[in-house]
Image (cartoon, grey):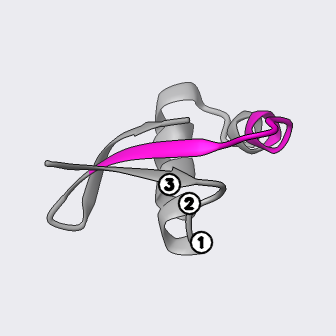
C-alpha cells in the first residue's frame, strides 16, 4: 500500500472517492467538505493500492 500526502484539495476524481468512503463510514459527506474548507492548511493522506483507496485522513 502506498500512502500519499496532498496539500490542499485532491483532484476531483480522488476527492469523490474520499467523499464516498466518508459517507459510508459517517453517513454524512457534507461535514468533511465544510470542516476542510474552514482549515487554513489542508493535507489529505490516502492509502492507495492498485487504484483502490483504503484509508483517508485530513
Along the viewing direction, whichever of 58 and 54 lies nearer the viewer: 58
Q: Tag 3, which secondary structure?
A: strand
From the viewer's perspective, is the residue at label 1 or at label 3 nearer? 3
How packed mark 3 is, by other alpha carbons closer than 10 Å (few <14, some 14-19, many 20 or more), is few
> Residue 1 at what x, y percent from top left?
13, 48
Q: Which residues are magenta?
A: 34-47
Contact (CB < 8 A) between labels 2 and 1?
A: yes
Number of on-image labels: 3
25 vs 5: above or below = above
29 vs 48: above or below = above
Q: Tag 2, which secondary structure?
A: helix
> Residue 48 at what x, y percent from top left?
25, 54
**Residue with the mark numbered 1:** 12
In the image, what residue occupies the spot 57% across and 50% down?
A: 19
Answer with mark 2 or mark 3, whichever residue precedes in sequence. Answer: 3
From the viewer's perspective, is the residue at label 2 or at label 3 nearer? 3
How packed mark 2 is, by other alpha carbons closer than 10 Å (few <14, some 14-19, many 20 or more), is some
Along the viewing direction, whichever of 54 and 5 lies nearer the viewer: 5
Answer with mark 1 or mark 3, whichever residue precedes in sequence. Answer: 3
How packed mark 1 is, by other alpha carbons closer than 10 Å (few <14, some 14-19, many 20 or more), is few
Contact (CB < 8 A) between labels 1 and 3?
A: no
Q: Is residue 39 magenta?
A: yes
In the image, what residue occupies the spot 50% across and 54% down?
A: 6
Can you tell which mark lies on residue 43? none
Q: CA distance from mark 2 to mark 1?
A: 5 Å
**Residue with the mark numbered 2:** 15
Q: Is residue 54 magenta?
A: no
The quadrant of the picture occupied by the C terminus is top right
**Residue with the mark numbered 3:** 6
In the image, what residue occupies the spot 72% across and 41% down?
A: 41
Amino acid at each position: 500500500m502506498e500512502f500519499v500526502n496532498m496539500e490542499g484539495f485532491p483532484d476531483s476524481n480522488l476527492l469523490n472517492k474520499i467523499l464516498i468512503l466518508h459517507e459510508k463510514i459517517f453517513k454524512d459527506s457534507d461535514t468533511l467538505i465544510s470542516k476542510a474548507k474552514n482549515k487554513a492548511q489542508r493535507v489529505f493522506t490516502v492509502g492507495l493500492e492498485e487504484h483502490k483507496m483504503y484509508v483517508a485522513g485530513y
